[in-house]
Image (cartoon, helix red, strand yellow):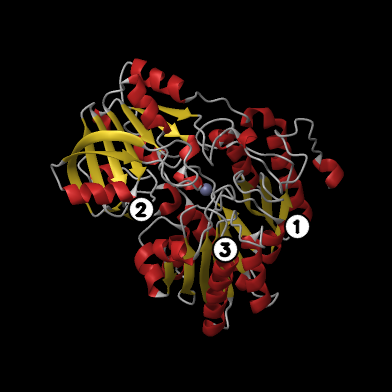
């Protein structure tokens, strides 16, 4: 049994000014063949889970052939030329290596390209067209998918992450691959049902370790435990993609019984709909959060910069919290900033040099201008680090580009990076000799992705309602493409699964 492994992974923030081009994918990673094995086999990623079925399935006849996988940081709309080139490369690798008994496909589920608001559905449809209707496709998606009928209809079985932060991509991909193997053998006959109530779940209520999401995921687990049910997924949606199918979605996959799948998907959707008010959250603003951190009995208080969520498509160079911290005189303060120009200036000055420079706030969507700081260059690093523990999304190898640690007189530490990189690994600071637990305030750019790195040492984690193209305040965006009505934009939106069924 030969299974093709393919992937195209991009979370597209359509509110970002700069489009995403081929060079962005090339920088982050376009992997072919054995490169996929080297980068992922020992990681906790979707690709790792797919590879695992070929190595540890206990079924010697299963061979997983890694073909092609393209990913870039979450960022703006993918240009049409880039999309066509990547889709072309992906399809070519599939055609050259065939025929196939099955396809293992890793997509994000919130990719948008020029002309393709459902870029994931487009990729899946082209693969389906290439291999014909009878070859099973196992589709593994991020929990933030804006799940569409087109994606699901191309796939034989669809499995989403069930944790946020995403610590289970490898497990879910392995499950997905097992379903494909069993389908090829004729042991199971997956039937999928998708339910899409008019519901948006705010990013600040999406943590699966806390309510309201914990209860909802428990309901999904209960559905999965039913006889004949293969899997069930909750797509929390990605509100920073202005596309018709933006929003939450509920999927159930049963072995052979469409009515059971449909009833389960409707049950989960109905439960979420009942709880829709709990997905609308209030979080403190920058001054309030910083003052709360200064008054806390002990640190570090980790402030989650929701508006500059690198995992949601920002550049990680918002200076808003830094400026406010300096205004308030916050001491023992630590944060990262993307600023390649400042890195160049610091490297030119050299380790130990003192300098005054403008940092951050230089990219088009940054919500706050650059801030003038003075300090000395304590350390220059190549920015590479590795994390063997599960991080958000399952990544193991990280590259922040040339990185500078700048110490300022006010007991404030800035880590300046020349690549856009999230604060998702404890090794980011450890590799620079920084111990975040010694600080009073640590800013982490993200909502849930920094938690595996910071929850173990934080006295408190505080979500901060900062502006930016990933702000929690969705009323700041002008949507042109999303469907209407959609709760909570239109509070009068209604949903009744029984009528649809
Ligand atoms: Zn996600």
CA gap between label 3 and label 2 equals 21 Å
Classify mark 3: residues with Cα within 10 Å, few (<14), some (14-19) or many (20+): some
**Crowdedness near tag 2: few (<14), some (14–19) or many (≥20) residues, C-alpha within 10 Å:** many
Question: Residue drawn 58% across and 47% down?
Answer: 15
The percent position of residue 463, horizontal first and vertical second, equals 47, 29
Task: Tell me whether the residue at label 2 lies in contact with that at label 1, contact meaning CB atoms closer than 8 angstroms.
Answer: no
Query: Within 8 Å of ligand 1, the CB of disc 1?
Result: no
At 19% from the left edge and 51% from the top edge, which residue is drawn? 348
- Residue 333 x, y percent position in the rendering: 29, 29
Label 2 to label 1: alpha-carbon separation: 49 Å
Res. 296 visible in picture: no
In the displayed structure, would residue 398 be above or below residue 359? below
Is residue 341 found left or right of 74 in the rendered image? left
Which of the labelled discs sits on residue 419, or is there none? 2
**Depicted 296 relative to depicted 351: above or below:** above
Label 1: which residue?
257
- Mark 1 Cα shell of 10 Å, populated few (<14), some (14-19), many (≥20): some
Q: Mark 1 falls on what kind of element?
A: loop
Q: Secondary structure at mark 3?
A: loop
Residue 28: x and y in percent read 41, 61
Q: Which residue is mark 3?
A: 79
Whether residue 3 is situated above or below residue 75 in the rendered picture: below
Identify the mark nearer the N-term, 2 or 1: 1
Give the SS element for disc 2. loop
Name which of mark 3 and mark 2 comes first in the sequence.
Answer: 3
Q: Residue furthest left?
A: 352
């Amino acid at each position: 049994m030969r299974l093709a492994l393919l992937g195209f992974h991009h979370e597209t923030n359509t509110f970002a000014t700069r489009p995403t081009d081929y060079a962005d994918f090339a920088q982050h990673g376009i992997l072919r063949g054995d490169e996929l094995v080297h980068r992922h086999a020992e990681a906790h990623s979707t690709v790792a889970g797919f590879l695992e079925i070929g190595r540890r399935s206990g079924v010697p006849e299963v061979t997983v052939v890694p073909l092609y996988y393209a990913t870039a940081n979450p960022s703006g709309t993918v240009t049409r030329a880039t999309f066509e080139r990547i889709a072309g490369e992906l399809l070519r690798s599939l055609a050259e290596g065939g025929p196939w008994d099955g396809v293992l496909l890793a997509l994000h589920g919130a990719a948008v390209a020029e002309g393709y608001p459902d870029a994931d559905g487009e990729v899946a449809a082209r693969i389906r067209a290439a291999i014909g209707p009878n070859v099973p496709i196992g589709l593994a998606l991020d929990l933030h998918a804006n799940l569409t009928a087109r994606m699901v209809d191309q796939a034989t079985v669809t499995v989403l992450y069930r944790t946020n932060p995403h610590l289970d991509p490898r497990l879910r991909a392995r499950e997905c691959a097992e379903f494909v193997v069993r389908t090829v053998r004729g042991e199971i006959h997956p039937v999928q049902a998708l339910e899409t109530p008019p519901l948006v779940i705010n990013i600040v209520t999406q943590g699966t370790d806390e309510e309201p999401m914990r209860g909802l995921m428990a309901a999904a687990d209960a559905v999965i435990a039913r006889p004949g049910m293969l899997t069930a997924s909750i797509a929390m949606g990605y509100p920073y993609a202005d596309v018709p199918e933006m929003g939450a979605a509920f999927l159930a996959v049963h072995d052979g019984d469409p009515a059971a799948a449909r009833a389960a998907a409707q049950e989960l959707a109905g439960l979420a709909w009942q709880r829709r008010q709990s997905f609308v959250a209030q979080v403190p603003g920058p001054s309030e959060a910083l003052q709360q951190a200064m008054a806390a009995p002990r640190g570090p208080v980790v402030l989650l910069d929701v508006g500059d969520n690198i995992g949601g498509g920002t550049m990680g160079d918002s200076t808003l919290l830094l400026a406010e911290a300096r205004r308030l005189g916050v001491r023992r303060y630590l944060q990262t900033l993307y600023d390649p120009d400042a890195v160049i200036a610091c490297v030119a000055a050299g380790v130990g040099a003192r300098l005054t420079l403008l940092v951050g706030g230089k990219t088009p969507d940054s919500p706050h201008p650059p801030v003038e700081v003075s300090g000395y260059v304590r350390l220059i690093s190549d920015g590479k680090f590795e994390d063997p523990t599960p991080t958000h999304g399952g990544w193991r190898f990280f590259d922040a580009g040339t990185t500078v640690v700048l110490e300022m007189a006010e007991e404030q530490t800035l880590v300046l990076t020349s690549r856009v990189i999230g604060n998702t690994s404890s090794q980011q600071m450890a590799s620079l000799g920084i111990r975040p637990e010694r600080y009073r305030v640590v800013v982490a750019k993200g909502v849930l992705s920094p938690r595996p790195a910071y929850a173990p040492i934080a006295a408190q984690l505080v979500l901060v309602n900062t502006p930016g193209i990933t702000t929690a305040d969705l009323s700041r965006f002008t949507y042109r493409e999303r469907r209407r009505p959609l709760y909570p934009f239109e509070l009068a939106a209604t949903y009744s699964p029984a009528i649809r069924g």
